[in-house]
C-alpha cells in the first residue's frame, strides 16, 4: 500500500533496535526559523544524545554550517532528497537525481568531494516501488520508524498531545524509532496569523525533545543512533559539539 505507513514498523525490533533502546530522527531541516535546528542540537548535546537528521538539499544550501555541526557532533546524516517532492510523482531516474543532488549539497557543506550517503528516508515516508528499486541500486539503507506521531499537524499551542503520545509509545513498547520535524515541508499546513498556532512554527521541538529525553532516560531507556543496530550513543567515542 502506498501510504505513509509503509515506513512504519510497529515492533521497535524491526527497525534494528534492541529492547530498551530509543532512536530519534528529525526530518526536513536544517531550519533556522526560530533557530529550531541549532537549539535542538544544543539540547541533544546537553544530554549526550546522538540522533538521525533527514536533511533536504534545498535546506542544506541555506544552512551548510548547521550540517557541519551535525556531522562533527556525531549525528547521522540521512539523505531526504534535494527538493522533498512526493515520491508518487518520481520515477527511478528522477529519484536518483534527487538523491545525488542532495549528496552534492551535503558534500559541499562538509567539504567532502564525492560524498555518498549510506542512509535514506523517502519524502513523506512514502515507499514506492521506485524508492525500493533505487535504494537497492544505490546500496543505501532506509531508516524506518516504529511510530509516526503526526507532529506536522500541530503547533506550539497544541504540541503536548504529540509529545505525550511519543513518550507513552516508547514506555509501552520498551523503546522505538521516532520522528519529529524540525523543518516545515509537509502539508497540510495550518498557516495562522497567530504564529503560535501555525504548524509551520517548529520552535516547540527542542523543548519537546528535552522532555522526551529526560522522561525516557528516567524510565531507564537508552538513546542510540538510528539505523545502526545496537550501536549505543557514547559521547566519549565522538567529538563534542
Ligand atoms: Zn520529509
Image (cartoon, rainbow, N blue to C red):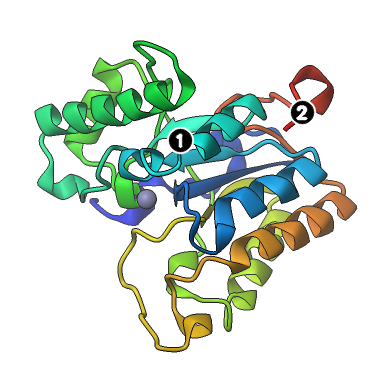
Q: Residue furthest bottom?
A: 193
User: Mark 2 and mark 1: span between their CA atoms?
Assistant: 19 Å
Residue 169 versus residue 138 in the image, above or below: below
Quadrant (top left/top right/bottom left/bottom right) for the C terminus: top right
Secondary structure of residue under mark 2? loop
Left or right, residue 87 beside residue 35: left
**Residue 226, can we see it?**
no
User: Which quadrant of the view contains residue 60?
Assistant: top left
| For residue 155, side relative to residue 45 (left or right) | left
Give the residue drawn at x 44%, y 79%.
198
Density class for disc 1 (Cα within 10 Å; few <14, some 14-19, many ≥20) is: some
Q: Which is in the foreground here, disc 2 or disc 1?
A: 1
Q: Is residue 201 visible?
A: yes
Please give the name of the residue rendered at 74% of the width and 21% of the height, measured from the top-left corner. 238
Task: Name the foreground residue: 120 vs 195.
Answer: 195
Q: Nearer the viewer, residue 96 or 229?
A: 96
Q: Which mark is residue 156?
A: none
Residue 1 point in image, percent of width and height: 24, 51
* Residue beneath disc 2: 240
Give whichever of discs 2 and 1 has the lower sequence position: 1
Distance from mark 1 CB to nearest ligand 1 atom below 8 Å: no
Q: Nearer the viewer, residue 50 or 113?
A: 113
- Residue position marked by numbered label 1 in the rendering: 64
How crowded is the residue under tag 2: few (<14 C-alpha within 10 Å), some, or many (20+)? Answer: few
Outermost residue, top side: 113
Residue 26 lies, in percent from the top left, at 52, 48
Q: Position of residue 219 (x, y in %)?
A: 86, 54
Left or right position of 241 against 70:
right
* SS under mark 1: helix
Which quadrant of the figure has residue 13? top right
Amino acid at each position: 500500500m502506498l501510504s505513509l505507513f509503509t515506513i512504519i514498523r510497529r515492533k521497535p525490533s524491526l527497525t534494528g533496535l534492541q529492547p530498551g533502546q530509543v532512536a530519534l530522527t528529525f526530518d526536513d531541516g536544517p531550519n533556522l526559523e526560530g533557530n529550531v535546528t541549532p537549539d535542538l542540537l544544543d539540547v541533544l548535546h546537553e544530554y549526550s544524545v546522538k540522533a538521525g537528521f533527514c536533511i533536504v538539499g534545498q535546506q542544506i544550501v541555506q544552512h551548510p554550517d548547521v550540517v557541519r555541526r551535525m556531522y562533527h557532533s556525531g549525528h547521522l546524516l540521512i539523505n531526504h532528497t534535494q527538493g522533498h517532492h512526493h515520491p508518487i510523482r518520481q520515477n527511478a531516474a528522477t529519484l536518483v537525481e534527487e538523491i545525488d543532488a542532495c549528496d552534492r549539497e551535503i558534500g559541499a557543506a562538509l567539504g567532502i568531494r564525492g560524498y555518498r550517503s549510506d542512509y535514506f528516508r523517502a519524502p513523506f515516508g512514502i515507499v514506492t516501488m521506485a524508492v525500493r528499486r533505487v535504494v537497492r541500486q544505490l546500496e543505501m539503507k532506509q531508516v524506518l520508524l516504529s511510530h509516526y506521531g503526526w507532529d506536522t499537524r500541530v503547533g506550539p499551542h497544541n504540541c503536548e498531545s504529540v509529545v505525550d503520545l511519543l513518550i507513552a509509545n516508547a514506555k509501552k513498547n520498551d523503546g522505538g524509532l521516532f520522528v519529529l520535524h524540525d523543518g516545515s515541508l509537509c502539508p497540510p499546513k495550518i498557516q495562522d496569523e497567530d504564529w503560535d498556532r501555525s504548524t509551520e512554527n517548529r520552535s516547540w521541538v527542542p523543548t519537546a525533545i528535552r522532555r522526551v529525553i529526560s522522561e525516557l532516560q528516567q524510565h531507564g531507556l537508552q538513546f542510540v543512533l538510528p539505523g545502526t543496530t545496537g550501536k549505543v550513543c557514547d559521547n566519549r567515542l565522538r567529538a563534542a559539539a
